[in-house]
Each structure stands twice: as C-alpha cells, then as structure tokens.
Amino acid sequence: RACADPHARGCAHTCACARRLCQELNLDAASAAEALRDFTALRGTYSLEGEALHWLACALYVACRKSLVPTVGSGLMEGNGVSLTRILRSARLSLIQFFSKMKKWMDMSNLPQEFRERVERLERNFEVSTVIFKKFEPIFLDIFQNPYEETLKPQRSRKQRRMPCGIKDLFNFCWTLFVYTKGNFRMIGDDLVNSYHLLLCCLDLIFANALLCPNRRALLNPSFKGLPVDFPMTEIKASEDPPCIIATLCELHDGLLVEAKGIKEHYFKPYISKLFDRKILKGECLLDLCSFTENNKALNKEYEEYVLTVGDFDERVFLGADAEEEIGTPRKFPADVRVGKMAARAHVECHLQQHFEKKRSFAPSTPLTGRRYLREKEAIITPVASATQSVSRLQNIVAGLKNAPSEQLIAIFESCARSPMESIMSRVKEIGERFCRSYTQSTDEQPGSHIDFAINRLKLAEILYYKILETIMMQETRRLHGKDLTALLEQDVFHRSLMACCLEIVLFAYSSPRTFPWIIEVLDLRPFYFYKVIEVLIRSEEGLSRDMVKHLNSIEEQILESLAWTRDSALWNALQASENKVPTCEEVYSEGQRLFLASSTEG
C-alpha cells in the first residue's frame, strides 16, 4: 500500500537520489545524515518548489561547511573537503539558482547570522569575479592572439604532438593565476577596484614573460599598443627588468595607474616571489616550453587545494565549456559563435545584469528625493569602468590639495573669537584612528583590509572634508555678513557627520563591501545627524558624480524610512527641543543648511 501512494513513491525516489548524490561526492556519513535530516524536516514543514535535489544541495552545503576535519598538525580544518562547485555540478544546480535558493533555505532553517554573512560574501565574490572576467576577455585579446581561433585550425595527425602553452592554455593560466592570487588576499577578493588592478598585474606579468621568451612572442598580438617599438626584434635578457604595460592597460581599459602600481609593488610582486620560493612557479621564463607545463600543473594543484580548504566555488568555472550552464544562463549558444567577438557571452551578461541590478554596490537605485541634484545622465558603462571612474573623479576633486586646512580655512579659523583649529584637527585624527582600526580588523562579516588601503581611503576623505568645510564656511561668512563663526565651528556633531559622509563617499567610490550604515556604526554617529549633513555636502561640492549623489540620496531614503525612527533616535530629542514644531518641506529645502548648523547643538 505504501508503494501505491504517490507521495511515498516521491519520497523514496528523493531518498534514492540523495544517496546517489552523497556517494558521488564521497561524503562522510555524518554530513550526509545531517543534510538528509535537515532536508526531510524542512520538506515536512514547507512546500519546496522546484527540484528536490536542488534543495538537497543547499542542505549539503550547510552540512559540509559545519563539518570540522582533524588535520595532521593536530588542528581542525573547516569543511570536509567537498567544494561548493562539486555539490552544484552533481546536483546540476547553477550558481545563480543556488544563491536564490540558499537565501530561502537560510530563512526556513533559521541559520545564524554568521552563516548568512558567509553566503553574502560568497555571492559578492562571485559578482566581482563575473564582472572581472567580462573585462578579462577583451583585454587578453588586445594583448595576445585570439584563443578561440585555435579551435578552427585543422586537426593534427597522430604523429604531431600538440605544443604546450598554446593561446588557450595561456588564457586559462592567466585567469587561474589571478583567481589563486586573489584568493590569498581576502581583503582584495570582494573589492571590485582592487581585484581589477590585480588582474592587470597578472596580464602584465604574462606579457613580460611572453616577450622574454623569443619562441613565445608569436602569442602576442602584433597590433597591441604596449609592444616595444622594435618588436619583434626586441632582445631582453633575463637579468633585465621587462617592460611594464600597467600604464598602457590603465589608459586603454579604465584602470587607475597609481592604484594599479600600488597593488603591483606591495602585493603582487612579493606574492609572486613567494610562489617562486615555494617552487610552485619555476624557470627564468614562466612560458618557456620546459617550464610551462610544470608551472601550469603546480598552479592548478595549489588552487584546487585552496578551493577544497576554503570551500568556496571554483572560479575556473568561467573557463569551462559549460560555463554558461554552471553560472546560470537561460540558454546556450553554439560554440562557433564564440570565435572572434565572443558573442556567446552576450546572453551571459544580459542574464547576470538582472542579478547585479539587485545589488546596491554596483547599481544604486534611483532615489525619490533630491532629484534636482542629479547630474545629466552619463553613458552606459561597465561596472569596472563605473568603479574606476568614480575613484578617478574623486581623485580629480581633491587633486593638488592636502589633508590639512588650507591657508584660507586657517584664516577663517583665526578670525573666530576662539580658534577651533586645534579641536578640529584633533577630532579628525581621532576619527581617522577609529576608522583605520575598524577597516583593518577582521570580523565575522568580512575580512580586515591592509592598513595601506585604510590610510589611502582616509587621506582622500580628510582632503574632501577640509575642502567642503572651507566651502561651507565661506558660504556662511557671506550669509552672516562676516559675523563670528565660533559657535558654528565648535559643533562636534556637525564635524563628525561631515567627516563620516566624506568617508562614505570614498568607500562608495571604491565599491567597498563596507556599505552604509557601517561608517556610522564605526563612528558611533546617530543616523539623524548624518541625514542632516547630506544635503549640505551635496550643495557644497559640485564635483560629485551622478552615482555618488544617487548613493547619498538612497541613504537619505534609508534613514527616512527606518533608521531615523528607532527608539534611541536623536530625532525625538530634536522634536522635544523644538516643542514639536516640525518645519515644513519648503523650509527644510530653502534653509536646510542653516537649520543644520543652527540646530545641531540643540538636537
């Protein structure tokens, strides 16, 4: 009778599929039992739409990540050696489908916040890698020959051996070097700007080695603008420094030269030296026929161990023939369409764009407030170009300025009855120390960044702070007809709010994963005060990009919708102090700046 029951037959079929999946993954008994138990419990409570095997994959991922395996050195390794990529391949579940289902699974399972944050980091890392790979292909084609044209060449006879280090091999080697290096710098992994510049460093290294080996120069694109003038007759000795094309790549492909050189000198070059010391990379030339096969094999082996240890997805998925299917695109193009222009990636980009549009860090939503401050809409550009152009525009705003008060601002300070200069600079220093401490500290939510990154971001914010403060004070001097500004300049909450807003602008420009309200939590600042300084800042700095203004306006909405109405909000004190006389919309827009400066101490 049980077999006659369709529901019972379905359960039996699912259990059989689950056992086959666990056997295929060679899963330990404890993890398999936990996954099946959790899956069965949720299936009895909720209606799981779609294929049962896909939901089981979510249960398996959770069980595998919870598992702790003893190591030889008496330590414990997180995970059980089963990567997310293997789980998804065995369950025939794409990455985009996985993230969608995993969010629902975490809600239904009531998983802890720490695990949710892990999945969010994984998703962001996937987004960054997807955007970077879309840039990698055209840049590679600019420097090297087309890897897809190799597939059109006539088949070799059995006696002819395929030469190692063909164009396709080089393409795969370069990407693997990038993802492996990125994985070893956790502070770079989910940072779009830094990851992009790290990719340029990898391409620069491969180019230099192709130029170093006379028999590898055929891999280079003869029309590449970064080639030496006397190419292909150029002679470079192994002892000489090879030509650096970082500047050329930044010029041609939306890079930031100072940022890219910083990544190369302080991170990439020392790390490559370590790989040579550990014998992972060998030879005077990485691409030499004698060295390349060993280098490629060793690098892939190291990366596979990294994937198994960390338990993240294998980012070489972008290189596979089934990349579209594994990432999660709706249909597949014939292979020959990829030749030349690589049009097969067009539908990938379209499908992924729908996924990215939900993510604020890459596509800030159009705000309902402050539309009049938006600049004219800019041309559609890629996420990488958008990020690097945001940083470039920010650097242009502060070009030639120092992270200290200008002579004109010092003159304003000295014209006050009590000079606020010492307290202002002391406050900026204290905020900077707190910012750097939090920015470099690892948490459950995200890894800490290197102190160099923190100092660089802070310096930009300090310059912007002093520049905007000077503009505001000059406007107030004109409005008050030269009256004393001591009372305004002694308002602690105004300075803290302005500095926090400048830091938020810098973090946004760099597409930092530390999104609002991270900065006000770090500086222990009330959202109400941060809200009041936004319009003051936008009015005072005309150089802000359209995206920056949209981002600040989206924060305004976030504060208006929820953050300003919490139990401990400063808004209630402000209303009480004003005897519940709420200003009209017209008064706020016409006198927003004056209202902030006049009421900050009261509120």
Image: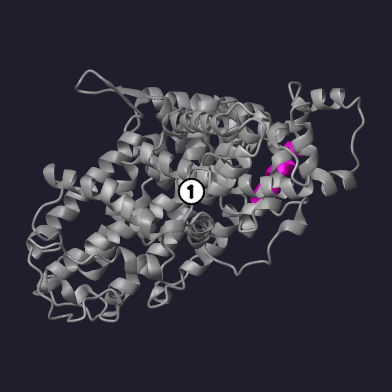
**75 lies left or right of 251:** left
The amino acid on which the numbered mark 1 sits, given as a three-letter code, is Leu
The percent coordinates of residue 503 (x first, y second) are 55, 41
Q: Quadrant of the C terminus?
A: top right
> Mark 1 — residue?
95
Residue 375 lies in magenta, yes or no? no
Which of these two is toward me, 286 or 398? 398
Is most of the magenta stretch helix, strand or loop? helix
For the record, the magenta segment spans: 551-561
The structure residue drawn at horizontal position 20% and vertical position 65%, both measured from the top left corner, is: 208
Vertical position of residue 35 compared to residue 86: above or below: above
Residue 559 lies in magenta, yes or no? yes
**208 lies left or right of 408:** left
Q: Residues within 10 Å of mark 1 (few under 14, many from 20)?
A: many
Q: Residue furthest top?
A: 74
Element assignment for label 1: helix
Which of these two is toward me, 81 or 145? 145
Vertical position of residue 577 compared to residue 118: above or below: above
The percent coordinates of residue 102 (x first, y second) are 55, 38
The structure residue drawn at horizontal position 33% and vertical position 65%, both measured from the top left corner, is: 247
The structure residue drawn at horizontal position 37% and vertical position 56%, both measured from the top left corner, is: 258
Vertical position of residue 229 compared to residue 384: above or below: below
Count up the numbered dots: 1
The structure residue drawn at horizontal position 45% and vertical position 33%, both measured from the top left corner, is: 436
